[in-house]
Structures are given as C-alpha cells and as structure tokens.
Image (cartoon, rainbow, N blue to C red):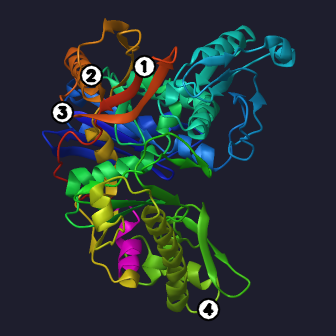
Amino acid sequence: MLLGIDVGGTFTDAVLLEQAEVAAQAKVPTTHEDVLHCLLAALDAVLPQAERAAEKLERVVISSTIVTNALTEGKLDPVLLAVITGPGMNIKGHVPVTPYYLSGYVDHRGKITAQLDWTKHRDLLNRQGRGVCAVSGKFAVRDPQLEFQAQHELKKCGYEKIFLGSELSGELNFIRRTNSAYFAAQVYALFKRFSQRIARALAERGITAPVHILKADGGTLPLAVALEQPVEAVFTGPAASVLGIEALAAPSVNSISLDVGGTTTDIAFWEKSLPLMAKRGAIINGYPTAVRSFHMRSIGIGGDSRIHKLADGGYQVGPEREGPAAAVGGSKATLSDALITAGYVSFGEPQRSRQAIAALGGEPEPTARQIIAGAVAVIRRTIQEMLDEWAKQPVYTVDDVIRGTEFVPQRLIGVGGGAPGLITALGEAMGLPVDIPLGAMVANAVGAAVARPTLSAGLRADTTDGYYIIPESGRRERLPRGFGKAMAQDILSQWLREQTAEWLLPDQETELISYEHFNTVHGYYDRGDIYSLRMQLKPGILHKVRGREVRF
C-alpha cells in the first residue's frame, strides 16, 4: 500500500493506493501556521478508510508548495553567498544577492592556477557565522578543492551548513550552479523544520514506512537525503500534478495540463503521452538554476483568488488568496463565486455567490463573465509565453531540425478542485476540447504516491592517471581497455542498478543528466582525456492508477 500526501496552498490531500486502485482519499484545509496539524488531519481522515492501513504501508511520499511559496513570496532572509569567479567574469545581477568574492581560481582545464589567499579575507573569517551559507566556484566541477577549502574555513567560523555549487550540479554553467547553491542554503532551515514535522506526524500515527520527498523532476528522495538537496523540493506541487495526470490519464495528443487549486494554477505541456522537461533547468524568482524540472509555470490564479475592481471598470483576479468562496461561507467574492454565478460549476449556496458578485458593482451574471474572461486572458498569455519560450529552445537533435521545436496544443487536461469550471471556460476561449479525468480532485496526491524513487551518482575518469572514481561508492578502479563515454555510462549505470537491488528499490531505467569531456596536453606531446558524468534512476511513475471521483 502506498500513501501520497500533497500539502497545497489551500488544501492538503491524502490518497491510499492498493494494487493500482484508490483505496481511500481525503482533503482537508491547509493550516500554514501549523503544518503538523493539517498533516495529522489528513492522516486521520484517510487511514480509517482502509483496514490496517498504517501497518500495510510500504512507502509515504510528500509533495508540498512550502518551499516554492516561501521563495516566490520573498519570506526568507538572505544568506551569505561566497563565490570564486577568478578573472574576467562579472556576475552582478545574475545572482539573487550581492556575493562575497573569494580569491583563487580554477581554470577551464580543472587546474588550480591561484590558491585562496585568506590574508585577504580576514573580514569574512572574523565574522561570527551562523546558520547556513553557499559557496560556488567557476570550473569547480572540474576540481572542487577550492570550494572544499572555503567550506572548511567557514565551518570554523560557525556556519552550521555550507552548500557547494559543485555538489548540486555536475554541469559547467556557473550561474545556474551558484543560484542552486544559494537557494538550497536559503530554504534549508525552513525545509528542515518541515521535515521534522512530517516525521513527527507520521510517528504519532504509528507509521514506520520509509518517507520520501517529491522532486521537481518527478522523482523522489528519502527525507534525510532531501535535506542535503532542499532546493530540489521547489515546484514539487506542480510536479505532483503532472505525475498524477500521467498515472490517471496521460494524454495521447499534444496537450496542456492545468492544475487549478485554491491559490494557484500550474501549467505543463505534454507530447507523446509524456510531460515535457525544461531543457536547461528551473527558473526561481527570475534566476536560472540547475534544478531539473518539468517545463511548467505557476500563476497566482485559483478558485479562492481575490477579485480586484480596477479603475477602468475591469477586474483583476489574484494573485492573493481571499479565502473560501462566498458560496461556502466566505465574506467576499472569489473566482469560484464568479464561476458559480456564470453557471460553469454548482456547489454551496449559489445565491450567496450572486450577492457577492453583485457587491462588486453591476449585474451578477455579466460581471461574473467579465471576471472569468480576465482570468482566462491571463492564463492564455502565460501559455503563449511558454509556447514562445519552448520555440526558442536550442535545437539538439536531427529530429528537431527536421520537425522544428514548435509545440501545437490539441487538448486541455484539467485537475484540481477548481478545474471543472475554469478549464471549461479556457477551452471555450481557445477552441480546444477539455478532459477532466476521474480522480482529478486528488491528482497531486496520486502523483506523489506513485512517483519513482531516484538515485544519482557521478563518475570522473582521467586517462593520464589511468583510474576512474565513483565518489558515492568510494570506488577507485583502473580504467578498462578502450575506455570512453559509452563505457563510462555502462559502468555508472551498472553501479546504480546494483544499488537499486541492494536498497530494494524498483528496477528502472537510468539516464544521463550531465556530461563533460575535455582533452589535456602534457609536455607538448603526451595527451590525455578527462571524463565527468552524472546519471540517475529515471523519474516517472511506478504504474497507472484507476481513479474514482468523490465529492468532498
């Protein structure tokens, strides 16, 4: 039996799956001031629906918007970012804070050409460090020794945790690695508290099954491992909805999926029954990172969004959440009330919705349709921006050259509590058919429950030395004859599969997530090669799920 829990901005959903069937499901309000309370409430609502559920559980997976919301809302304090840029690079404006510049330099070959000179950084060493910070060096993926030295000195200053750019990504892009390390440091304390509350909630209900956190690319990590990579927990709510759609009803044609919650709408693209991945990495608060994620966008429009009347007589929906709709006891009109008044959905007391919409000025039904049109226009603009962004992606394959990278949607897929009304209105505006699969109300929790676990590892080889290393295993072996990229992938893939069997994880494909190869010349004549690659167990879903619809 699998348990998936999605802590959303408005509701926390829980789903129990048994043999690809939804055995139990529940939806409770999210209490942001006390996440432990809503987790316990969700567990108490779902566990009694299945006999001996706590004992039968094989795994628990949590997805949450807590990290995404904290970053996008600017609620987190800045942290120290120390960078080793070397000569010729100005990163001002490309990172979220003004960094501290350390001396030292690793060149493009991975050779340390200048050591850290700590006599120049007495001001940093004399600080009373506290909390968490980040260190990132250009070309550190080719030799991380300067990052390690900075980490050692900063720990002596009192910093509890130091995130290194080279440990969060094996790719060369310095800016993306630096931003990943910074955001990981910024969310660490918040994510640690959240993880502790999850552990307490499950322990209080007698659950001893392994606990995993969903990643932005749709894989899962054990809770303890996720603490070492907390930035991976960004965009897990949107990732859960994508996996939920894949499990419940993956579209067979080019489609756009929209997860409409109470606070936000998450948009993703689908091609050949699979979600499209961002080709470069997630964008957080406008800054590029190395976090692998789906090609997605979240916007502040949901069923509980506040409605603002504008000076020109129009209406703006969101991004703030007003609270429950007037139809179910709220004090002011929300987008849900407009959808009820316009006849797209029906729940609660429709007359209360009409009264709340009328209080904004004008006749209820025309006003409601004007509000909905405004929300739909914002979503359509966002979709067009995503289409334009995808079309501008670099061309990587011959197939891309022949067919191009243009994405033409043929269908809309809606999940989430607010989907039935808003997606229908969007479909009318775009002239596209709309599908809302069975189980759409708790699709995020379904997606979390069936997400595959991921495990990643790296390999570095130097043909001059004649050895390769897999740092995660502590293995250092002599290079086999005929060593090259293909053999390096085979060696690393085999090690990952061995670990899969040892840790009793389900067998699954491996994928290459970063690769570097460059030549070295020694004494004008001798030539060598350095290979650096990183692979992981491929994310996705364990199996399809037969959903069932229940009104909460």
Residue denoted by label 3: 51
Asked if residue 68 lies left or right of residue 3, the reply is right
Residue denoted by label 1: 527
Q: Earlier in the sequence, mark 3 or mark 4?
A: 3
The amino acid pointed to by label 3 is Glu
CB contact under 8 Å: marks 3 and 4: no
Q: Tell me where the magenta segment starts and ends, as one range.
A: 415-427
Cα distance in 3D space between marks 3 and 1: 66 Å
Residue denoted by label 4: 362
Q: Nearer the viewer, mark 1 or mark 2?
A: 1
Q: Earlier in the sequence, mark 3 or mark 1?
A: 3
Residue 550, position as x, y percentages in the image: 26, 58
Tell me the quarter of the picture where residue 333 sits.
bottom right
Cα distance in 3D space between marks 4 and 1: 79 Å
Q: Secondary structure at mark 4?
A: loop
Asked if residue 313 lies left or right of residue 530, the reply is right
Q: Residues within 10 Å of mark 1 (few under 14, many from 20)?
A: few
Q: Earlier in the sequence, mark 2 or mark 4?
A: 4
Q: Is residue 204 visible?
A: no
Q: Earlier in the sequence, mark 4 or mark 1?
A: 4
